[in-house]
Image: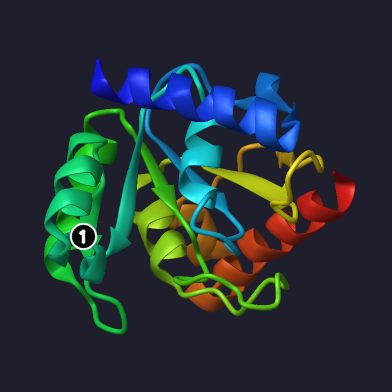
Amino acid sequence: MFYKFARSLFKLFFLIFFRLKVSGKEKIPAKGPLIVCSNHFSWLDPPLVACTIDDRQLFFMAKAELFKIFILSFIIRKLGAFPVKRDTADRRAIKHAFKLLEEGKSLGLFPEGTRSKTGETQTPFNGVAFLAIKSGAPVLPVGIKGPYKFRKPVEVNIGEPLRFTEENCRSRGRKLTDISENIMQEIKQLTKDC
């Protein structure tokens, strides 16, 4: 209930202040586990992505530092976010992510791990590829084209779901880094197609 209310408020905010334009919504799988991945250059990216995937709740993996701020921690936990310790293999966060996917829920991730200060896409971490291969969940690439400036359009382009099964990747000899780069390239292309 709180998630839907917050998403409605943010959607109104984006429509009024940034003339939000979304394309590719028909590509969003209606049900089943899903990993939604986007480029990341602003703190507004998580609520924006949540607003574009509006038939499903997104559970975002967010940096642990955000959960040290009491009010913010309370709000983002209510919205379904969970902490991850960056620059380490955070087993607790990975276990929670797998649990969400096993339950058929949607996971929100930024493969770059942090915001890009230049707006250009950065080298991705391998976490998304690992989760996709081990869970079998499709990866939905999302490209955001800004900047977030008052009354300037913010465009979101949703791509075709990508599938990476463990068996398929092993037979082709694909490595996590290759798959991570593939996902990031799809996202990068979507920012150009906006």
Q: Residue furthest right?
A: 193
Percent x, y for residue 114? 47, 72
Quadrant placement of the C terminus: top right
- Position of the N terminus, as image quadrant, is top left
Mark 1: few/some/many CA within 10 Å (<14, 14-19, 20+):
many
Residue at coordinates 69% horizontally, 55% vertically from top-left? 187
Residue 86, quarter of the rendered image:
bottom left
Q: Nearer the viewer, residue 177 or 38?
A: 38
Q: At numbered mark 1, what does the secondary structure look like: helix, strand or loop? A: strand
Question: Nearest the camera: 119 or 97?
Answer: 119
For the residue pair 43 and 40, the one nearer the viewer reads as: 43
Residue 33 visible within the image = yes
Residue type for callout 1: Pro
Image x and y of residue 80, in percent: 24, 38
Q: In the drawing, does residue 33 fall left or right of residue 64?
A: right
Q: At 60% across and 79% down in the image, what residue appears?
A: 123
Quick check: 152 left or right of 170? right
Q: How many marks?
A: 1
| Residue 42 image-quadrant placement | bottom right
Q: How is the image coloured?
A: rainbow
- Tell whether 117 sits left or right of 104: right
Residue 43, placed above or below residue 117: above
| On screen, residue 57 above or below 73 | above
Q: Which residue is mark 1?
A: 83
Q: Is residue 23 visible?
A: no
Give whichever of 129, 169 is nearer the camera.
129
Q: Residue shown at 30%/25% (left/top)? A: 3
Residue 99 pos. (x, y %): 18, 42
